[in-house]
Image (cartoon, helix red, strand yellow):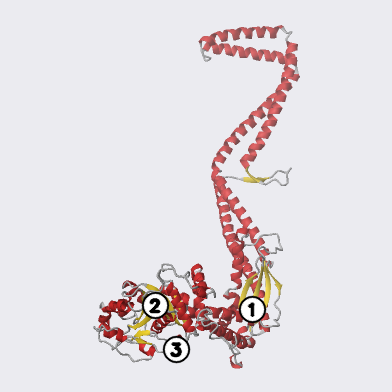
């Protein structure tokens, strides 16, 4: 059979069965290729009516909900949230500039502000929804009676918070992907109310945005005012300290600026420095005048010298002066200037100079005298100014030394003044910017009164109901599949038993299935013929000479299968006999319609007259042996060697000996019998024993050394199976009409 599960012998299927395209073989091949898909498909088909019923129930529930649900109307308002403000003035605000890296964070902040509780409370207060009969009626509330129209502040705040919580549940913020647009959707049972809330939500968001900016500017102004006051106090204190120090140190300054450059800054300069500059200018002028007077004197002296050069007295004096100077030079080589003879020579030289000057004055006239007087006056003025400059410079150096601390105080004053000016300028800008309503939010589309309800939607609700139905059906199927572990189709019988499928026996409406077996045209007879044919290929020698039919529990059709297999062999000309070995619950005598006389239990107890125990079916002539009287120790009888002797004795007269064995579960009889025959046919009732019991029973048979030939699925109803197998046993007989 080519569709056997691995680890089991592969048995061929008769050509008569494969020619019709046996669905069991096809299903087995598909299960081998796609086991998981097939397993889920089989489970779904097993509980198809549960699945269909659950889905239909959910669809009906969805339709009922759609008809009974409250009509909801949705109004949409669209706003634009720009990342940059619309600036009226060319000055920055107090909020930081935002770059592309924080753009997503900015928009997420705006969306959360739109969903904020404070936003809902603003809308509730602006529309007075706590007292609005339309809103209260839409949300199941009642308008306050006239006696309670006047509410305390605490009651009004509590009602507003309650209304805000309800508003948050009906408002949705939906950003438009890829743009700065945001849709505000409001869903309520009243279309007019939905439009009013949506528009108010957008307007209040803009107002709240402006308030936040104004509050930021107000805080900045208050902060700058405090800083201005503190900076002003520091500046005044620094100026007082600077003036006190200047007064104590005698430091006087004056403000000077470059008259040629009106934009040049004013410079503070001390009086001493100013005087020094003036004295330097005067000294420079005096020096120039002295140089000019000296030049004039030299010119006049030159002229006088030329006149006096012809005088003999001047020449004699000059010769005398030269001699004295020569002697003075000799003395200086040896002695110091304070040497008395040297001092005497020096006095003589000076006397000669005066004499020469007097002589020249007499000879040069009044021109030289005037030039000399001018030169002397210029020189005296220059010396006086130089002396004053030197003194003023000394005073300035001393003043500079004392002005180091003054400079420190001056810089502190300048710093405070610059800070104060900057804060004052910023304060003016913030005041102007705060007074202008700069905003980055604008309403694009106002909400209109919706003309049709947005929910409930029949298609959406039915689709949701379908999904819920599928989920519930899947859950129920999983639960039922875990609870129901019976075998329902041939493929599952192979999978659970890990045995080749010998055949599928259809269920019958006849209370006595044996009557269907005796009818050669029935589907039961055809099915057992297929099983007998499969047994031919179960061994290399054909149908085993001795075999046994058993099952997990009683009532699974093992006795009928034993009798039917023997009858099928008998009909093809093979000698076969059925032996009832179920000593606890015998059935063969009922199938044959005879009394339970001497039989198997008698032979096992020591009666060797086996031939006297053999009966023959009156209709078909099939040989059988009944179970005989019920012994008190059935397991002991079956465990003895007498059962092997029975099989051997019958084998001498019959080609096939078929034993009807007891069920395996809970009894030791079948494992004992299985070891005494050549093969075991295991019968499994469709939707009968549970899979764990079947596996346990097969494990006991294998542990006893029994040779398992295959599995026969009994009482199979294809109408209740996962998929139609289409077993049309009796084709050409059962359904044939006269004349066909």
Disc sitting over residue 682 in the figure: 2
Q: Nearest to the eye among marks 3 and 2: give it.
A: 3
Q: CA distance from mark 3 to mark 2?
A: 22 Å
Can residue 441 be seen?
yes
Residue under the image location 53 percent in, 14 percent down: 337
Q: Nearest to the eye among marks 3 and 1: give it.
A: 3
Tell me the quarter of the image containing the C terminus.
Answer: bottom right
- Graded by Cα atoms within 10 Å as few (under 14), some (14 to 19) or many (20 or more), the crowding at tag 1 reads many
Name the residue carrying label 3.
515
Q: Nearer the viewer, residue 19 or 74?
A: 19
- Graded by Cα atoms within 10 Å as few (under 14), some (14 to 19) or many (20 or more), the crowding at tag 3 reads some
Labels 1 and 2: the sequence-earlier one = 1
Residue 2 percent across, percent down from the top left: 48, 69
Do the residues bearing badges 1 and 2 touch, measured as CB atoms within 8 Å? Answer: no
Q: Is residue 304 above or below residue 446?
A: above
Q: Is residue 534 left or right of residue 740?
A: left
Disc sitting over residue 186 in the figure: 1
Residue 9 percent across, percent down from the top left: 42, 68
Q: CA distance from mark 1 to mark 2?
A: 69 Å
Q: Nearer the viewer, residue 162 or 80?
A: 80
Do the residues bearing badges 3 and 2 touch, measured as CB atoms within 8 Å? Answer: no
């Amino acid at each position: 059979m080519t569709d056997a599960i691995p680890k089991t012998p592969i048995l061929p299927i008769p050509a008569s069965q494969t020619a019709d395209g046996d669905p069991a073989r096809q299903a087995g091949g598909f299960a081998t290729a796609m086991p998981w898909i097939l397993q889920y498909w089989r489970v779904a088909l097993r509980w198809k009516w549960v699945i269909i019923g659950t889905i239909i129930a959910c669809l009906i529930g969805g339709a009922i909900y759609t008809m009974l649900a409250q009509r909801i109307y949705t109004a949409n308002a669209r706003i634009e949230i720009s990342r940059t403000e619309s600036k009226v003035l060319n000055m920055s605000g107090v909020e930081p500039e935002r770059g592309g890296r924080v753009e997503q964070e900015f928009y997420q902040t705006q969306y959360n502000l739109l969903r904020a509780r404070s936003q809902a409370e603003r809308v509730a207060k602006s529309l007075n929804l706590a007292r609005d009969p339309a809103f209260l009626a839409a949300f199941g509330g009642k308008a306050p009676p006239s006696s309670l129209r006047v509410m305390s502040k605490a009651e009004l705040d509590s009602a507003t918070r309650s209304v805000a919580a309800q508003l948050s549940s009906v408002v949705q913020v939906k950003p438009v992907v890829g743009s700065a647009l945001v849709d505000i959707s409001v869903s309520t049972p009243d279309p007019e109310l939905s439009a009013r809330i949506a528009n108010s939500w957008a307007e209040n968001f803009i107002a709240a945005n402006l308030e936040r900016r104004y509050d930021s500017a107000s805080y900045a102004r208050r902060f700058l005012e405090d800083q201005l006051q503190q900076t002003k106090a520091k500046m005044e204190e620094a100026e007082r300290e600077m003036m006190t120090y200047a007064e104590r140190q005698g430091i006087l300054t004056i403000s000077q600026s470059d008259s040629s450059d009106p934009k040049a800054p004013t410079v503070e300069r001390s009086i001493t420095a100013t005087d020094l500059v003036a004295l330097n200018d005067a000294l420079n002028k005096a020096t120039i005048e002295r140089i000019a007077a000296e030049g004039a004197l030299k010119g006049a002296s030159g002229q006088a010298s030329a006149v006096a050069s012809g005088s003999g007295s001047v020449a004699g004096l000059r010769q005398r002066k030269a001699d004295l100077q020569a002697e003075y030079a000799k003395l200086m080589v040896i002695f110091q200037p304070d040497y008395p003879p040297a001092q005497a020579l020096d006095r003589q030289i000076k006397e000669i100079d005066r004499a020469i000057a007097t002589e020249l004055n007499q000879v040069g006239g009044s021109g030289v005298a005037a030039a000399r007087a001018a030169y002397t006056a210029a020189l005296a003025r220059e010396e006086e100014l130089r002396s004053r400059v030197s003194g003023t410079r000394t005073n300035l150096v001393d003043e500079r030394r004392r002005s180091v601390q003054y400079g420190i105080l001056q810089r502190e004053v300048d710093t405070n003044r610059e800070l104060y000016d900057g804060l004052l300028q910023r304060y003016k800008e913030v005041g102007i910017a705060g007074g202008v309503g700069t905003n980055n939010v604008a309403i694009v589309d106002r909400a209109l009164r919706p003309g049709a309800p947005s929910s409930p939607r029949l298609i959406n609700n039915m689709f949701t109901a379908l999904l819920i139905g599928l989920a519930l059906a899947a859950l129920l199927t999983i639960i039922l599949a875990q609870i129901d572990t019976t075998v329902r189709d041939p493929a599952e019988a192979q999978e659970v038993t890990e045995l080749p499928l010998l055949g599928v026996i259809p269920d019958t409406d006849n209370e006595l299935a044996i009557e269907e077996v005796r009818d050669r045209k029935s589907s039961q007879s055809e099915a057992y013929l297929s099983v007998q044919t499969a047994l031919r290929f179960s061994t290399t020698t054909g149908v085993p000479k001795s075999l046994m039919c058993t099952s997990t529990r009683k009532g699974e059709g093992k006795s009928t299968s034993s009798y039917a297999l023997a009858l099928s062999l008998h009909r093809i000309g093979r000698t076969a006999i059925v032996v009832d070995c179920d000593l606890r619950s015998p059935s063969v005598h009922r199938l044959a319609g005879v009394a339970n006389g001497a039989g198997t239990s008698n032979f096992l107890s020591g009666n060797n007259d086996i031939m006297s125990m053999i009966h023959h079916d009156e209709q078909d002539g099939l040989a059988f042996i009944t179970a005989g009287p019920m012994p008190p120790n059935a397991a002991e009888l079956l465990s003895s060697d007498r059962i092997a002797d029975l099989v051997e004795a019958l084998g001498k007269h019959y080609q096939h000996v078929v034993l009807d064995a007891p069920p395996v579960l809970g009894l030791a009889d079948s494992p004992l019998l299985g070891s005494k025959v050549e093969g075991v046919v295991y019968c499994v009732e469709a939707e009968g024993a549970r899979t764990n019991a079947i596996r346990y029973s097969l494990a006991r048979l294998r542990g006893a050394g029994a040779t398992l030939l295959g599995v026969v699925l009994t009482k199979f109803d294809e109408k209740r199976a996962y998929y139609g197998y289409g077993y049309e046993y009796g084709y050409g007989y059962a359904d044939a009409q006269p004349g066909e």
